[in-house]
Image: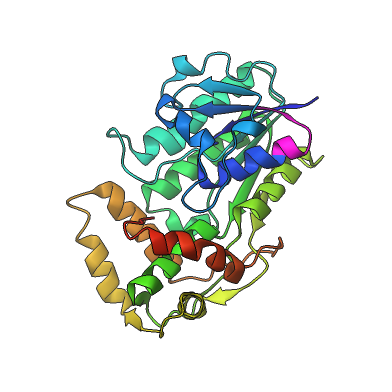
Amino acid sequence: MRKVLVAGATGYLGKFVTREFKRRGYWVRVLVRRKSLEKLDEVGPFLEPAIREYVDDVFVGEVTDPASLERCCDGIDVVFSSVGITRQREGLSFMDVDYRGNVNLLDHALRSGVEKFIFVSVFNPHLFEELEIGRAREMVVRELERSGMNYAVIRPTGFFSDASEFLRMALSGRVYLIGEGDKKINPIHGEDLAKVCVDAAESGEGRREVPVGGPDVFTYREMAELAFSVAGREPKITSIPPALANLLVGAIRPFSRHYYTLAKFFLIAMQNDFVAPPTGTHHLKDYYRELLPRLSRRSDFRV
């Protein structure tokens, strides 16, 4: 039986990946922070599954602390990592977690003789070179290239969890777009993306990149209109000129470089097309319908 270590297992994608590896007969170890152990038993805020039943071994460690990872990869054939931060925590930066954390994991994988490393980075990485989050993840890709290890870099256009923000805004009564909202994207459901990740782990092809999106292509305006339709609300859409949006996002920078980076990331994404080869069977309209009751109940919902 092949063995896998899933790092980032309590995140949106990581939960689906953990389940998919188990469904395909793998022995599954998850790397989890002590503070996140309870998430193994919880359905996530974006309908990602509870995964305790799919886990054979829980390894408690911090990717930012190499000593805590000792022996985490022993006996492991494949390492999967979607490790990264979105919300600021404990003073850590994207370089601390997205770069150094993943490199620490790679170092342990190399020492333990792991066969393959699957890493999730960004689509259209050249657009994010100025941002720490983009640089950090692409620096990991460069480390993989230099490592000599067999690897695959997965580049999704965007997650359904990100697209849920349009439904949240629709429920609040108004959706805000950057410009006319005419740029296109085909976001992908976590379950569909998990299959792509596990396919890459099982593929005989090595050292490759996998751009991937979902089955349906939308403009951002069409996504907003879909959200209003599912919410049963009259569409109210406000277009913010890109110059003004950049000015507003720039005002965040003196107060929080972290949240400036996240805001700038999504600002760039909404001003460019993000369309990759389509895959999967999950449709955004169905996802919005599934998510609607949860968002309607949780007025404090935040992404």
Q: Quadrant of residue 51?
A: top right
94 lies left or right of 58: left
Q: Quadrant of residue 26?
A: top right
- Give the total of numbered labels: 0
Residue drawn where x is 28% and y is 75% of the image: 243
Q: Which residues are magenta?
A: 21-28
Q: Nearer the viewer, residue 12 or 201?
A: 12
Coordinates of residue 78 in the picture (x, y in percent): 69, 30
Coordinates of residue 193 in the picture (x, y in percent): 65, 52
In magenta stretch: residue 262: no
What is the basis of the colouring in this image? rainbow
Q: Nearer the viewer, residue 107 or 263?
A: 263
In magenta stretch: residue 27: yes
Q: Nearer the viewer, residue 34 or 71?
A: 34
Coordinates of residue 177 in the picture (x, y in percent): 38, 76
Residue drawn where x is 48% and y is 63% of the image: 293
- 160 relative to 231, above or below: above
Residue drawn where x is 46% and y is 51% of the image: 45
Q: Work out whether residue 163 can be spotted.
A: no
- Can you say which quadrant of the picture contains the C terminus? bottom left
258 lies left or right of 151: left
